[in-house]
Amino acid sequence: MTAGVNFVPTTCPYCGTGCSFYLVTRDNKVLGIEPWQTPPVNEGKLCQKGRYAYQFIHSKDRLTKPLIKKNGGFVASTWDEAYRLIVEKFKSFKPEEFGCLASAKASNEDNYLMQKFVRIALKTNNIDHCARLCHSSTVSGLSEVFGSGAMTNSIPDLQESKCIFVIGSNTFEQHPLIGRRLVLARKSGAKIICADPRYTPTAKQADLYLSMYSGTDVALLNGLMHHIIENGWEDSDFIKSRTKNYDSMKKTVMKENYNLKNVSEITGVRESDLKTAAEWIAKSKPCALVFAMGITQHTVGVDNVKSVANLMMLTGNIGKPGSGVNPLRGQNNVQGASDMGCLPNVYSGYQMVTDKESRNKMMKIWGVAEIAESRVGYTATEMIDNLADEPGKIKCMYLLGENPMLSDPDINHVREALENVEFMVSQEIFLSETAEFADVVLPAACYAEKNGTHTNTERRVQRWRKAINPPGEAKPDWLIISEIARLMGYEKQFSYKNESEIFDEIARITPSYSGINYDRLEHPYALQWPCPDTNHLGTQILHTDKFATKDGLGIFMAVEWKPPAEVTDPRYPLILTTGRSIWHWHTGTMTRRSETLDREVKTGWVEINTKDAETLGIEDGEKVKVSSRRGEIEIPAKLTEDIKIGEVFIPFHFKECPANVLTNNAVDSISKIPEYKACAVKVEKMNDRDKEVVGRGQRAI
Ligand code: SF4
């Protein structure tokens, strides 16, 4: 070891896989990242984002001082001046006039204090975070079917599978170290099935690729179940002993609409491929199902999730190693931010705000006589709609590191909303596209500069460890929130000495985290919830004997297929689906400041099938105009046969060609998740707007 060099074990700030590594530091600088072999998630391996997750830390444009907007521009201020203004303004608004967004990139401690502050000091439940945009339909759907919205199995456990059905997840690019488990499972003889409108790197690794149209998931899943039941391949013992409502589900999927001939017509998947997939899923036990935003980000996101749960219960693939319903959560701590109660309907541990006992429990532990009323608050998507469509309803926004100006659908609508905010505070590490709209920007510490915990996609609680000091006057989010709360009169409730003390309060108030504390997270480094007491070793597999529903039974749901909210027509004849690149992360705030990642992929592109491109006269690399009913962007075309004819794909990281100018803000009626995965667009050569466009015409998807 070189003199003065330290190796600080911590966890990746990007995706929900939760890989761990050492930050290599010297003289308060992070020099690089080295593998840490012990953690079970990644076993010393990293993807390119994790490998270079240190390069943005010392960027020259990190925020180092509080900023206050004066005469339309930002002016550096002292913390005292910024806090005084915030407290004065916060005290001037009514509870229902606040809209608050927590952060799936921040720690559990930051998020727990954010919702505690919002409920105690601002007295509102108007708090949400970007889980609304990625997996709110998972939480709603699985909670109804299983009684719990989390991933049922574990990442290493995928290697026990004999068959893995990946639907709506480009696992190799979005969760690369989970993708590695698919390869290892396949080496041990597992069959991999992948259903996706794009022939992604994940699809290319599969034994069977189901080339489906975007927005046809329920039809596909009902078709598979139809064929399984028709052939008597269902797991009757599991259905009888562990579930209820089977007959109603069976009646729906056995309708003629879902025979494989019709399903093939709706989904675009060959009938023979559907038959093979159904047989493999039913007969190769145990079978695991993996899904991500291709399932959730639809106006029927909750139906899609219920449908994947139906398939796994039908085949008895729940509660056993190598089986299960495995939603892959997007951001590093989107699971934790939800667990911590940064949602408008629940406190931490999914304790309902409408439940009198839960509300009394919070007031007692927090030592206050009053908190937000027992009424469900606004979701993130409702906050934006209220701001844009009913100015004056919400007047003040408090944001912890979220960037809706790039991440939300229909960006022109979001801009309109943010322009209507009377007062906005943003805690950030960089001046993001959204922070530009704030009245006060507070400089925050990044993951390498603070202690804390976060919870990955498989419910594994792991540590972040402070490796260096934050730049300039930046502070950890939990400390900023506590200092504002104390100035608002909540001295006793926010007088934490360190992060470990906050975690102990989380464990006291959150049943699934009760047995976890900082000492236990040193050895064996991580614990998976539920962990009900300090002797408990954590839970690798959920629902082994009974489900988390009231009577312990899984509930089959009858689900009918419905097309997406926006269908194609002669003017907008192509279906747009959006997603990520392996080289970048979400709105690019961190990855685009990493020189290695930026060197590899510098800007966005629209993927278009070579046949569609030929009809339009578009060449590879040519800049084209893509437009929807909401706006238009200019973007280079990438010609490929890896996407279905009639579909196009755009990654959403790039502010110079933002996919979300085009996307539709129609939402699922239950989870309020927007339909990012299907909207109607046209692609044109630049300055050639009258040229005839191609697509699937009037087809109703
Ligand atoms: Fe980080 Fe995800 Fe890559 Fe692991 S797979 S290194 S958590 S980005």
Image (cartoon, rainbow, N blue to C red):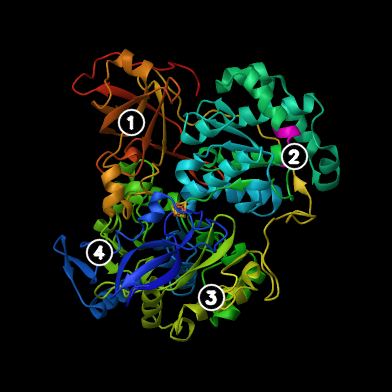
| Few, some or many residues within 10 Å of mark 1 (<14, 14–19, 20+) | many
Between 280 and 614, the residue placed more toward the observer is 280
Asked if residue 282 is among those painted magenta in the image, a careful observer would answer yes
Residues drawn in magenta: 281-286
**Residue 503 disc label:** 3
Question: Height in image: 288 above or below 358?
Answer: above
Q: Earlier in the sequence, mark 3 or mark 4?
A: 4
Type of residue at label 1? Val
Pointer 4 with pointer 2, Cβ within 8 A? no
Q: Is residue 683 above or below residue 517?
A: above
SS for dot 4:
loop
Observer able to see residue 101: no
Which of the 4 image quadrants contains residue 83? Answer: bottom left
Residue extending furthest front?
1
Residue drawn at x 40%, y 43% is 582
Asked where in the image residue 347 lies, by quadrant, the reply is bottom right
Name the mark on residue 62: 4
Q: Amino acid at mark 4?
A: Arg
How far, Cα to Cα, is label 3 from label 4?
A: 28 Å
**Which residue position is annotated with label 2?**
285
Tell me where residue 593 sits by quadrant.
bottom left
Instruction: Choose the circle earlier in sequence order: 1 or 3.
Output: 3
Q: Which mark is nearer the camera, 4 or 2?
A: 2
Q: Label 1: which residue?
A: 606
Residue 6 percent location from the top left of the image = 37, 74
Ligand 1 lies under 8 Å from the Cβ of mark 1: no
Q: CA distance from mark 1 to mark 2?
A: 39 Å
Pick whichever of labels 1 and 2 is earlier in the sequence.
Answer: 2
Q: Earlier in the sequence, mark 3 or mark 2?
A: 2
The CA span between labels 4 and 2 is: 51 Å
